[in-house]
Image (tube, grey):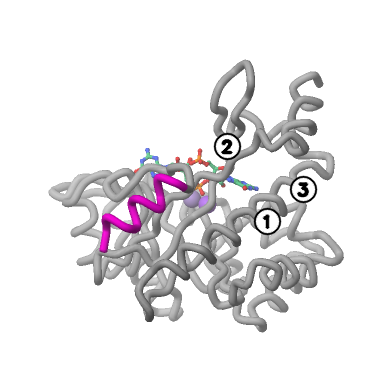
Amino acid sequence: AQLEAELENALLDDELVVYYQPVVSLATGTASGVEALVRWQHPRDGLLTPAQFLPLAEGGDLIERIDAWVMRRAARDVRSWQQSLPAGRGLHLNVNFSPARLQRPDLVAEVLDELAAAGLDPHDLVLEVTETAVLEVGRAGPHLAQLRARGIRVALDDFGTGYSSLARLVQVPVDILKLDRCFVHDGHETGPSVAIAQAVAGLGRALGLDTVAEGIETAEQAEQMRVLGYAGAQGYHFSRPVPAAELTRWLTGER
Ligand code: G
Ligand code: G
Ligand code: NA
Ligand code: MN
């Protein structure tokens, strides 16, 4: 309860920070986008990861406020990176939305307002959602459909780790499958994780969905995913999640 109260204050005191991890195009080797990942710079306990504090925010409305804050902050940062990149080089923003935020009655208007305030085009936004969140009954499905009609894309995060049947998942309005990092393996390996990585690539092709592989830690893994047909990849091989100033340097050094 004490940490929960501190978290409430952290949001007001600007102790939350957004880290960014590039999403790299395997065809070109350059960043096509960035994923925003929240951190809490705790005055006593140091830098906390989402797993250490987001559970405290769930249940009340704090998680929805954190999601909204992260998106506003990140949209401004991405807009400024877009303006500093060479003409023709796009950069999209991936943000994680909690099941609670997806259910908010005014979600669609709020997201469009947040984009407009930052000057970011709806086509440059990707919402990362989990399969449990989108399969929940309620407003999530209709909200995602309305956002997609405006050009916003939806990615199914941690794909392959949920419990939903493929039959239900293909009914969900999504654009991108993000293969969970537990299916990434060493280049020379064979076995179940390779078969699953291959099957998800095939599913993406068959359904016309983009595929992104998470947790890529070596050049061999990146190459194997490219050969399997993955369009994008994320992982320590390219960059860890880093603060905005470091991502600016990474983007500058990259080109
Ligand atoms: O940063 P890290 O790799 O530890 O993130 C772990 C998980 O925390 C991510 O997979 C993501 O699902 C979740 N997460 C990170 N940032 C946010 C956020 O701003 N909002 C929500 N709802 N979840 C986030
Ligand atoms: O929940 P979500 O998949 O959105 O969050 C991604 C999480 O995976 C973040 O916490 C991030 O720090 C972590 N991550 C990102 N790249 C790698 C990687 O290459 N290896 C490992 N082990 N973790 C990673
Ligand atoms: Na994510
Ligand atoms: Mn993920």
Magenta residue span: 245-255
Which callout, 3 or 2, points at the residue further toward the start of the chain?
Answer: 2
Query: Is 220 included in the stretch rendered in magenta?
Result: no
Q: Which residue is mark 1?
A: 133
Farthest-out residue, right: 105
Majority secondary structure of magenta residues: helix
Judged left or right of residue 121, residue 181 is left
> Residue 195's spot in the image, x, y percent?
29, 57
Disc 2 residue type?
A: Arg
Residue at left offset 19%, top offset 59%: 223
- Mark nearest the camera among 1 and 2 is 2
Q: Is residue 12 above or below residue 73?
A: above
Judged left or right of residue 183, residue 118 is right
Q: Which residue is mark 2?
A: 39
Q: Secondary structure at mark 3?
A: helix
Residue at left offset 79%, top offset 60%: 103
The CB of the residue at mark 3 lies under 8 Å from ligand 1: no
Residue at left offset 37%, top offset 42%: 240
Mark number displayed over residue 65: 3
* Quadrant assignment for the N terminus: top right
Q: Is residue 61 above or below residue 3?
A: below
Marks 1/3 in contact by CB < 8 Å: the verdict is no
Mark 1, other Cα within 10 Å: few <14 / some 14–19 / many ≥20: some
> Residue 139's spot in the image, x, y percent?
80, 66
